[in-house]
Image (cartoon, helix red, strand yellow):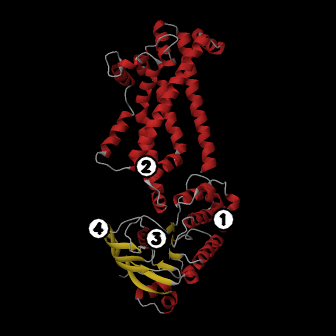
Amino acid sequence: MMEGSGALQLVLSGDPALYAVVRLSLVVSLSAVAVAALIGMPLGGLIALTRFPGRAGVIVLLNAFMGLPPVVVGLAVFLLLSRSGPLGAWGLLFTPTAMVMAQAVLITPIIAALTRQSVEDLWSEYRDELNAMGVGPFQRLLTLLYDARIALVTVLLAGFGRAAAEVGAVMIVGGNINGFTRVMTTAIALETSKGDLPLAMGLGLILIIIVFAMNASAWGLRLYAERRIG
Amino acid sequence: MSDLPLSFSKVSYAVGATPILRDVDLVVRAGAPTFIIGPNGSGKSTLLRFAMGLIAPTSGMIDWNGSRDPAPRRRAIVFQHPVLLRRSVAANLTYALDQAGVEKSKQDGRCAQLLELVGLLDLADRPARRLSGGERQKLAFARALARTPELLILDEPTASLDPSATLALEQLITTAAREGIKILMASHDLGQVRRLAGDIVFLHRGRILEVASAKDFFEQPRSAQASAFLRGDLITED
């Protein structure tokens, strides 16, 4: 009980160190969503609209990758970025950029797989009309991504939820350095193990509020868009 | 760059072991509207999808003025349940104009002109998917006209419309036909066929049983199946 009120006090006091952690969490996860969307949406759309040998295998793989364990992704990106790794010369390990990369790797399959499903469903509805208008392959991809935009908001949200909630990947490649790579999830893990439960709970509360607010606004946007677009 | 005449030679189509069309020979030329009629499941929609180039036959050949490339040039189709893009009414039309190669600078003017023609100008900014059935069908018709077609294919466009929307669409079809657009349309509303058709193609179980002028067909159908169809009997024999 004591700890609960301490947590609330922390949240309401606007402690600058606490909000730096919250801000970095948002920056890292939103950047990861942006990168993953730029890669995953066209990729998902492309897989939806093309037929090639091994396509079924690619789809199964993509769907399986939606459940990649964050620590494994973290380890892979760590090996890639470590001093002796192939990208070691970039000197990115234990920076926010490395954290963005790891989270982007984690959620690109989610965004690609869910986009593929949305675009493929829409294509079966639009196929005859678009063919009758003589729409070429590239324009077809753009049209379907645009017309699937309401569904794709939910797809982005799924990616954000996964990125903001994971701890393993950012812990490994970020290192949880105070004031530099510490985000909400790694801070919660650390403070819990240190025994500073009010801070851990305060951060947990903020994390839940952020995820809830994102979902609520996306839901509102969806309702509005459905009314506007049909 | 004409799509007419459209010729079917020995066109057959089967889905698995089920024949849908059998040995269809047909030439569609410029002129009065041609109506494809026949009972449900006789292959009307399939025949129209071939005419549009949306599917390829199992055997036989289709050509548009000698070309066997199915990419649409001067033809367009209106389906019974048109699929409209998740955009505004006007955006649906400019999309079609864009695909038809109309210059950007001329799209807005042409769009307004087409909306005016079909009576949807007031609804230009409305989301297309929120339109009523009759309005959807008018928009689909305008979208087809955006291609400035020579051949306009209509697959039972009024089948799920009320009488006033049906009348509005029939007037649009008549106007288009009068302006020289060849209409190729499926219908099983015999009243509508009498009102609009120049020629009749009678389809039964995937075969063409009769090709005749509307007048001849209604006065003296040659096949027993067509007579039965005109009487309104349920025809079950081959």
With A85 as the anchor, is B48 left or right in this view? Answer: right
Q: Which mark is residue B17?
A: 4
B77 or B106, nearer to the observer? B106
Q: Are marks 4 and 3 on the same chain?
A: yes
B102 or A43, nearer to the observer? B102
Above or below, B159 against A158 in this view is below
- Residue furthest to the right in view is B122
Q: Is residue B186 visible?
A: no
Label 3: which secondary element: loop
Q: Position of residue A59 (x, y in %)?
A: 35, 42
Other residues around mark 4 within 10 Å, as few (<14) / some (14–19) / many (≥20): few
Other residues around mark 2 within 10 Å, as few (<14) / some (14–19) / many (≥20): many
Determine which residue is flagged by label 2. A120
Q: Which mark is residue B1?
A: 3
Specify the amino acid type for callout 4: Ala
Q: Nearer the viewer, mark 3 or mark 1?
A: 3
Other residues around mark 3 within 10 Å, as few (<14) / some (14–19) / many (≥20): few
Q: Are marks 3 and 1 on the same chain?
A: yes
Specify the amino acid type for callout 1: Gln
Q: CA distance from mark 1 to mark 2?
A: 34 Å
Q: Are marks 3 and 2 on the same chain?
A: no
Which residue is at a point 38% across and 45% down the rendered structure image?
A47
B197 or A192, nearer to the observer? B197
Contact between labelled residues 4 and 1, with CB atoms less than 8 Å apart: no
Label 2: which secondary element: helix
Which residue is at a point 58% across and 82% down the rendered structure image?
B195
Q: Which mark is residue B113?
A: 1
Q: Are marks 2 and 4 on the same chain?
A: no
